[in-house]
Amino acid sequence: MSDSGKIALVTGAGSGIGRAVSLTLQSAGYSVVLAGRRAEPLERTAASAASPGGRMLCVPTDVTDPNSVRALFARTQEAFGRLDVLFNNAGTGAPAIPLEELRYEQWMQVVAVNLTGSFLCAQEAIKLMKAQHPRGGRIINNGSISAHAPRPHSAPYTATKHAITGLTKSISLDCRRHNIACGQIDIGNAATEMTERMTAGVAQADGSTAVEPRIDVRHVADAVLYMANLPLDANVQFLTVMATNMPFVGRG
């Protein structure tokens, strides 16, 4: 365990990748602000914290609500005085049904959480990172293998994850003069509740159903920690962590 003394904020910190990343950062000495819709899962993450390690602060947040996001970052500044790393991780999907059958509300919910939520959090992080001393920080966006290639019947999720790539590049360009680095981690089948269904088989592009391999979520958390620990004059722009045998590279 190293004592970094740095401050990180993780959205979607109550479960899955968000929980794993939060605990890995905390055990490495980061104080971590845990953001998510419900208090109870955040408190469960905090209760799993290593000792010794950084502090944990639970802040229930709706990333689709600008007022809630502003309150999250105000609370972060109040508690810690600065922010060194934002991990934009909160995400959701829509039912795996044909695009033409999706309801407008289903589409908009995915856009609101995955894309608008990431934008709103990045916006507030940038404001804080520009104003603090020393100035700067790092934003890490959770893309996905779906930022590169779709699964069948995944238009909302795939579209927003492709858009995250554009957001990542724009933040990198616009914020480098403020000493703010921005990168993206694209994850393929981390073993979380969200991917549990893959152990029973999921739809493939050729119409078949196949079991897909998964990887321990700690490999994702270790990768985020590596990205977070870089000095601000170095950046991992894009990093893909995936199960070696998952159907992604080539034709499946």
Image: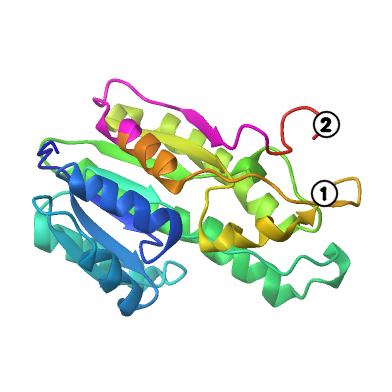
Q: Which residues are magenta?
A: 226-245
Q: Where 38 falls versus 218 (above or below)?
A: below
- Name the quarter where the N terminus is drawn: top left
Say which element carries label 2: loop
Q: Is residue 243 magenta?
A: yes
Instruction: Find residue 92 and report its image quarter.
Output: bottom right
The reply to whether residue 126 is visible in this rendering is no
Q: Disc 2 residue type?
A: Arg
Q: Which residue appears at 52% of the width and 42% of the height?
A: 167
Residue 221, percent from left and from top? 37, 43
Asked whether, in this view, residue 76 is left or right of residue 203, the answer is left
Q: Nearer the viewer, residue 110 or 24?
A: 24
Where residue 7 sits: x, y (%)? 18, 48
Helix, strand or loop status at disc 1: loop
Q: Is residue 63 visible?
A: yes
Between 209 and 26, the one nearer to me in the picture: 209
Return the residue at label 1: 204
Sequence-earlier tag: 2 or 1: 1
- Provide the residue designation for mark 2: 251
Classify residue 200 as left or right of residue 9.
right
- Where residue 77 appears, as percent x and y from the top left, is 15, 58
Q: Describe residue 31's horizontal placement relative to residue 247 as left or right.
A: left
Q: Residue at x 66, y 62 (%)?
A: 197
